[in-house]
Image (cartoon, rainbow, N blue to C red):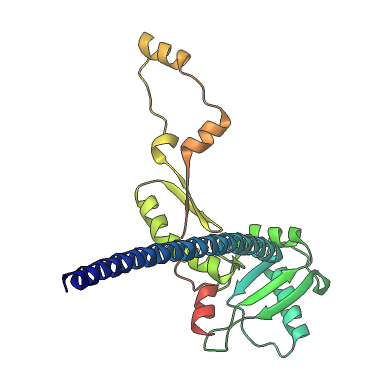
Amino acid sequence: MEDIMNALRHIQKELDEQKIAIQRSGEKVTEQVTQNINSIMEEKFTILEKKYDNLQTKVENQEKRLYFLEKQARRRNFVLFGLDEKETSYSNLENTLVEFTKKYFELNIERRDIQEIKRIGKKGERPRPIVVTLSNLGLKIEICKQKNALKDTTYYIKEDYPRDILNKRKELQKQLKIEREKGNTAIIKYDKLIVLDKNITNKRNLSISPENIHNLVNKPKKNKQQLSDSKIKVIRSNSVTEKAIKPSMLNFLTTNT
């Protein structure tokens, strides 16, 4: 009887050892499978991440290209505000613009100089602005140079900016006001705020003394690039025009579309 009990104990011990071995083997298999899955997933994630980065780079390049193309396409454009909306046809609107330019500007513009002309926005109480595309850039530049001729009238001319640039320029208006209140010379140029620091532009009068003369003589000169970098601060938006009294094209794009 005792021999049987010993045999049973031995069998039980072997079973326990086999059970432990099976558990350990299962844990190793599970760990190995998990590592393999993680390795595969990590490899796939790396591939996807590279594809995403490449795609993002392509999209950014396309956006830059579109930005440049749109900017180039609008170079010969200007927007005229305040002209009564009485035209009955496209050619009638062309003739109205030709007569308008001859009346207010020292230019001789003909219908053939107008590549395209159209009003934008929905009809309302105010006359809609007119976007004009001229046949050459020189005419557009001359008109913009003479836009002060409209100063005492209800008419005014602005650049033809894309909607996103108009929004950026509007965002920069607050910073423009702050810089001017500081006494700095500041202007909005396309989608950037250009600031010229007053402390650099104002020259201080030095009393004439040997020490001052020595300092002036021995003061190192800055090259043009250093002067440009030190005087000008450029702020980009992440501007309706500076004259807030008159509505801009953004008003028509946002309220009438």
Residue 165 against residue 206 in the figure, above or below:
below
91 with respect to 80 (left or right): right
Say which of 38 and 145 sits in front: 38
Name the residue located 46 percent from the left edge and 50 percent from the top edge: 186
Direction from residue 179 to residue 84 in the image, left or right: right
Disc tally is 0
From where the camera sits, is residue 165 visible? yes
* Quadrant in which residue 122 is drawn: bottom right
Residue 253, given in percent of the width and then of the height, sits at 54, 79
Q: Provide residue 12's location: percent of width, then percent of height.
A: 25, 70
For the C terminus, which image quadrant?
Answer: bottom right
Picture coordinates of residue 208 (x, y %)? 37, 14
Which quadrant would residue 111 be assigned to in this image?
bottom right
Residue 97 locus on image (x, y percent): 71, 76
| Foreground of the two, 244 or 41 | 41
Q: Residue at x 75, y 58 (%)?
A: 138
- In this view, which residue lies farthest toward the right? 112
On screen, residue 154 above or below 42: below
Q: Residue reaching furthest left?
A: 2
The answer to whether residue 240 shows anywhere in this view is no
Is the N terminus in the top left, top right, bottom left or bottom right quadrant?
A: bottom left
For this rendering, which residue is in front, 88 or 38? Answer: 38
